[in-house]
Structures are given as structure tokens and as C-alpha cells.
Image (cartoon, rainbow, N blue to C red):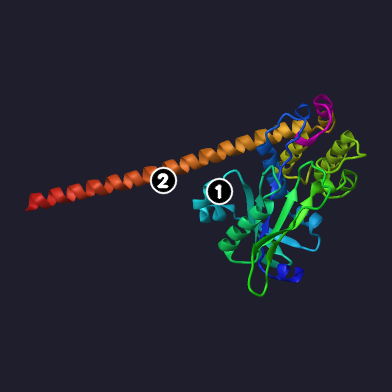
């Protein structure tokens, strides 16, 4: 089955059940949708690292995001898709460029997740008409006493009484923070703040993350640095004042302010450039239209005069 998945063009669906129990005293952002967006950002920024950690047998090469194509295809489903977060990529898997769709849902209940995943499987299959690989990743803080379902009964036939849609299940809380923080991957270190931190020191986890960032400062892109700061700020379990002291120790506040200002200026310049381009295009179009109108009017006037 694995060989079939890897050899065919596959589609990947993520369903995210966001945490709803963040201590407001520990974060300046308690909006559930913002937390959902952070997970989308995390997967976008660490796509290769995500596959390497959870699916080490799947070799990821180059990739590009094609979300707009999905949105355009399902314009009529906007109401159904409202509130859902998703990423869709063309990604090289084991040397073959394949279609991969990542669906991130922020539902607060698990009872209909299998049905929901099946719905998205159908959407994605209709988009590319290729095999679909579905994954659900649970990031809530609930402790599972028994495994959740990894299949959905969707059809039957005379020869096969029940036909099931199967998907993979990931539960971050089943991982231990003490194990994740030891990993070389920065993604794993960040996930340590959402994993089972029993026996771990929350302050030590943050120190470990910022020490890793400090060693990679010259290699990390601005968007990753901003993500790291916001992620740690949202999922820290230490007092705000102590967190500020740690950030100052690693000079993270200055870096964050500098990057934010740089991005703001860059966006402003891009906005100016787009505005100028649109203005020039409109001006040229208006000028051509006026010129044509004047030419036609003059031609008609001359023709009437000669007649």
C-alpha cells in the first residue's frame, strides 16, 4: 500500500483540532483562530521538516504552493469551506513531482472528523483526479484513553459489504516534550511546547528553542524568526515578565522589531510599485481610448466636409 501511495500522485489532507485551553495569563493572544493560523504557518514554514519527522520514509524535494487553484475550483463551496484553513502544494516526493493538498480544520469536536476528512478527500480528488492520502493531526490537550477512529464507512457492494476510507492519525500530545526538544529539527523543538510536557521544565524548553535559534540566526529566514517568536509567545507556560527577560537575553525582541519594520517597509514599497503600475496602465488605456475617439471624430468631420 505504501508503494502505491508513493508511486502515484497523491494528495495529503491535514485536519487540525486547535487547542482551546491556552492560559490567558501566559499569552497575549487567546483567539482560537489565531492558534489555528499558527499551525498553518508552522507547516508552511517547516514543510520538509514535518515530513521528515512524521513520515521519514517519504523523501520531500522541491515544492510550491498552489492554494489559489483550489480556491478558484471550489468558488461555489465558499460557504462550506468558510473558516477552514488549507495548504495545497506541488511537491517532489521520492523524485516525482506530485500534487499534495493539506487541509487544516479548527473544529473543536472529534465526532465527525472522519466524515469531514472524507468530504475533503472528494474535493481534492475532483481537483486533480489522483489518489488521495489523508492525515489528521490532533493538537488539542485532551488525553486519549483509547485510540480514535482512522477510517470512515462510505460505501458497500454486493461482493464487499463495507468499504472504508482510511486515513493516518497523529496526536501531538502523545509525543513527549523531553524527546522532541532533543531533536535537531527546529520544528520538533517548537512542537515540544504543545506535546506532553510532564517532567519537563517549561522555562528550559524555551531556553533550548532560543539557543537553537541563536545558533541558526544567519541561516533562518525572516518569516521563520517571526513565526518562532509568535509560536513561543502563544504556547509558553511561564510568566510574561520572565519570558521577556529570556527574549532580551537572546536579543530576540530587537530581532523581531527589526524584521517587522523591514517587512512593513517592503510591503509599503511593493504597494507603491503596484499602485504606480496600475496608474500607468490605466493612464495608458485612457489615453489610447481618448486618442481613438478623437481620431474617429476628426475623420468623420473631414469626411462630412469633403462630401
| Magenta part of the chain | 234-245
Helix, strand or loop at disc 2?
Answer: helix
Q: Magenta segment, principal secondary structure?
A: helix
- Identify the residue at image location x=68%, y=69%: 161
Q: What residue occupies the far left of the structure in this picture?
A: 307
- Identify the residue at image location x=72%, y=71%: 4
- Quick check: 288 left or right of 244? left
Task: Specify the quadrant of the image occupied by residue 120.
Answer: bottom right
State the separation of the CA atoms marked 1 and 2. Answer: 37 Å
* Residue 80: image tag: 1
Residue at label 2? 281
Residue 186 sits above or below residue 117 on the image: above
Whichever of labels 1 and 2 marks the residue nearer the N terminus, that label is 1
Helix, strand or loop at disc 1?
Answer: helix
Label 1 environment density (alpha carbons within 10 Å; few <14, some 14–19, many ≥20): few
Kindly indicate whether the residue at mark 2 contacts the one at mark 1 (C-beta within 8 angstroms).
no
Label 2 environment density (alpha carbons within 10 Å; few <14, some 14–19, many ≥20): few
**Residue 183 seen:** yes
**Residue 186 seen:** no
Amino acid at each position: 500500500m505504501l508503494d502505491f501511495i508513493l508511486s502515484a500522485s497523491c494528495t495529503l489532507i491535514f485536519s487540525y483540532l486547535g487547542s482551546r485551553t491556552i492560559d490567558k495569563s501566559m499569552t497575549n493572544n487567546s483567539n482560537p483562530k489565531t492558534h489555528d493560523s499558527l499551525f498553518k504557518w508552522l507547516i508552511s514554514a517547516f514543510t520538509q521538516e514535518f515530513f521528515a519527522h512524521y513520515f521519514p520514509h517519504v523523501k520531500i524535494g522541491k515544492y510550491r504552493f498552489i492554494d489559489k487553484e483550489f480556491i478558484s475550483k471550489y468558488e461555489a463551496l465558499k460557504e462550506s469551506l468558510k473558516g477552514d484553513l488549507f495548504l495545497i502544494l506541488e511537491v517532489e516526493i521520492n523524485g516525482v513531482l506530485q500534487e499534495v493538498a493539506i487541509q487544516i480544520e479548527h473544529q473543536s469536536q472529534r465526532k465527525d472528523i472522519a466524515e469531514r476528512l472524507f468530504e475533503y478527500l472528494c474535493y481534492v480528488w475532483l481537483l486533480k483526479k489522483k489518489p488521495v492520502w489523508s492525515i489528521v493531526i490532533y493538537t488539542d490537550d485532551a488525553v486519549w484513553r483509547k485510540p480514535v477512529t482512522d477510517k470512515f464507512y462510505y460505501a458497500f457492494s454486493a461482493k464487499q459489504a463495507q468499504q472504508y476510507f482510511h486515513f493516518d492519525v497523529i496526536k501531538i500530545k502523545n509525543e513527549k516534550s523531553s524527546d522532541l526538544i532533543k531533536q535537531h529539527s527546529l520544528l520538533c523543538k517548537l512542537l515540544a511546547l504543545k506535546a506532553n510536557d510532564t517532567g519537563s521544565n517549561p522555562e528550559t524548553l524555551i531556553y533550548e528553542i532560543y539557543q537553537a535559534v541563536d545558533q541558526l540566526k544567519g541561516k533562518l529566514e525572516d518569516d521563520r524568526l517571526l513565526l518562532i517568536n509568535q509560536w513561543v509567545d502563544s504556547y509558553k507556560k511561564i510568566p510574561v515578565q520572565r519570558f521577556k527577560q529570556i527574549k532580551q537575553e537572546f536579543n530576540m525582541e530587537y530581532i523581531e522589531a527589526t524584521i517587522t519594520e523591514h517587512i512593513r517597509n517592503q510591503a509599503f514599497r511593493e504597494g507603491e510599485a503596484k499602485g504606480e503600475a496600475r496608474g500607468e496602465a490605466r493612464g495608458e488605456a485612457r489615453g489610447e481610448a481618448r486618442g481613438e475617439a478623437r481620431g474617429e471624430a476628426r475623420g468623420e468631420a473631414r469626411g462630412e466636409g469633403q462630401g
